[in-house]
Amino acid sequence: MRGVLVLAFVSACTLYDPAAEIPHREFRGTQSAIGAILDEARGTHVYAIGEYHPTRTAIARQSPLARFTSEIVELLEPRAQHLIVEAWLDDTCRSADHDSIQMQVLKVTNRPPAQASDLQALIAASKSMRIQTHGLPMTCIEHSSVLDGHGRVDFLRLLLLVTEKLADTTKAMVGQGRDVIVYGGALHNDLYPNWPLEDLSYAKQIQQELGGGVLEIDLVVPEIVAPMAMVRREPWFPLLGRAAPDRVVVWERGPNSYVVILPAQDLEAAKVALPAGYGGATPI
């Protein structure tokens, strides 16, 4: 009898699913998940979309930007005809400083080469839907200001400048009576940022100034975030253990703030969020 009880106890521990303790919803596809979120969000003027950036060592068959282009932007088109991207599309400040900044940023962020082509694909797709794309306006002086006295990029200054430009460009659009989509990193669109990161969120600032109207959607590609140590502290991290090719997981951080774990390529990425001995993601 003791052996049976021990076996039952071990089996129960093995089958423990930490994701079961986190309120969440599951959908069969990306469009049904995003559609449900959009149906819930009322009075939205700013669709603040954020991604966890891919790197050369954390890649997937499709980047979050590519998935946004192929599956999501068309759902937003009836709601907003202007798209702001976290990029400088104007090349008038081409200089040695500009090239140095680009090289240093690429080296530190380790972005894959496909990122630029994914952005161009989004711009082309948006144009075909009659969505006007806007980059971040940047003067040559502002561009050079992110370099310190030794010619090195001050990354905090760069992040603050990006946040400022995202906020100013978005507020200008909303001030003209336009609803707008903003696509960038998941750091800047945070409606509920942790204390040290508050100054890097345009979304919280605009939400406070407008008294609402901002919808945050974070796009999580399992294969990209699985190697990232920083996501292990996120409240939604155990839900990564539910990632599967036929499943989208949605977690609501707070009012108008959603994390969307997109379909995984397979069940491998989910394993990083499962307890030792757990067999893998369970079917819906």
Image (cartoon, helix red, strand yellow):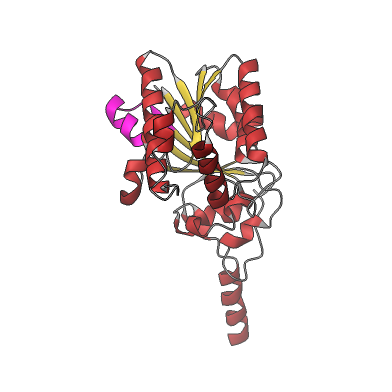
Q: Is residue 1 at least partly visible in the picture?
A: no
Q: Residue 190 location, x and y as percent?
A: 40, 40
What is the magenta range?
203-215
214 or 122: nearer the viewer:
122
- Asked whether residue 100 appears in the rendered view, the answer is yes
Instruction: Answer with left or right where residue 93 lies relative to residue 42.
Output: right
Name the side, left or right, on which 275 lies relative to 198.
right
For residue 151, above or below residue 188: below
* Residue farthest bottom in this picture: 2
For the image, the number of numbered tags is: 0
The correct choice, above or below, for 179 with respect to 251 in the image is above
The residue sitting at 44% across, 18% down in the picture is 179
In the rendered image, residue 114, in percent from the top left (x then y), is placed at 67, 40
Q: Position of residue 22 (x, y in %)?
A: 47, 52
Which is nearer the eye, 91 or 231?
91
Residue 262 magenta-highlighted = no
> Mostly what secondary structure, the magenta segment?
helix
Q: Is residue 206 highlighted in magenta?
A: yes
Q: Quadrant of the N terminus?
A: bottom right
- Closest to the observer: 242 or 233? 233
* Residue 113, horizontal then vertical, whole percent: 67, 42
Residue at x-position 42% and y-position 27%: 139
At x 50% / y 18%, what residue is drawn? 80
Quadrant of the image occupied by residue 207 = top left
Q: 256 or 177: nearer the eye?
A: 177
